[in-house]
Image: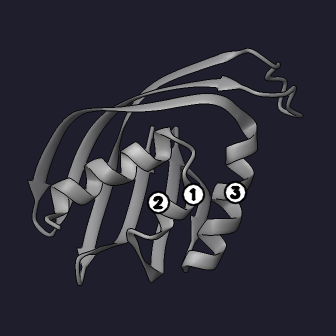
Amino acid sequence: MENEKIIREYVKHYNEFNLDGMLGLMTDDVCFENIMNGETDVKTTNIAELEQIAGISLNIFSERQQTIKSIKIENDSYVVEIDYYGRIADNLPNGLKQGDEIRLSGKSIYKFRDGKICSLTDIS
């Protein structure tokens, strides 16, 4: 499967809360990083760590949707501009309440090895 199709498949699985589908597109040593407002708040270095973190986030949202705005190739990376929408499932310790909506724009940077995602960085 070509890399752009893998990205679209990953986003489809993400939007469907399909963790197995998402992880099936990744290498065992996948590196994931989430950067918000210039600060890294999550970083993993293998699929087991990512599965744990992603599993927790499944329960945070009752709805979530990534929408791809563009995909550009830069050097060995695919830079994907996205719009993000999420609805909070339950009250959270950080003050977000059940039903609150989150809307963000950002980008995801994908790298590939052997037909799978080996690195994913989300920046918002």
On screen, residue 21 above or below 84? below
Where disc 2 sits, the SS reads helix
- Indicate which disc, 3 or 1, sits on the residue closer to the N terminus: 1
Quadrant for the N terminus, please.
bottom left
Label 3 packing within 10 angstroms: few (<14), some (14-19), many (20+): some
Left or right, 51 with respect to 105, comes to right
Residue at image location 74% in from the left, 38% down from the top: 60
Residue 21 or 36: which is nearer the viewer? 21
- Identify the disc placed on residue 22: 2
- Specify the amino acid type for callout 3: Gly
Side (left or right) of 123 relative to 48? left
Query: Residue 118: percent from the left, percent from the top?
Result: 36, 75
In the picture, measured across the screen, residue 85 lies left or right of residue 111, that is: right
- Asked which quadrant contains residue 123, the reply is top left
Residue 19 picture location, percent across and down: 57, 57
Whether residues under marks 2 and 1 lie with C-beta atoms below 8 angstroms apart, the answer is: yes
| Quadrant (top left, top right, bottom left, bottom right) of the C terminus | top left
Residue at left 57%, top 45%? 17
Pointer 1 local density, CA inside 10 Å: few below 14, some 14–19, many at least 20: some
Q: Indicate how the structure is coloured in the image.
A: one colour
Disc 2 marks a residue whose amino acid type is Met
Q: Which residue is mark 3?
A: 55
Image x and y of residue 48, in percent? 63, 78
Q: Are marks 3 and 1 in contact (CB under 8 Å)?
A: yes
The residue that label 1 is drawn on is 19
Please tell me whether residue 80 is drawn above or below residue 62 in the rendered image.
below
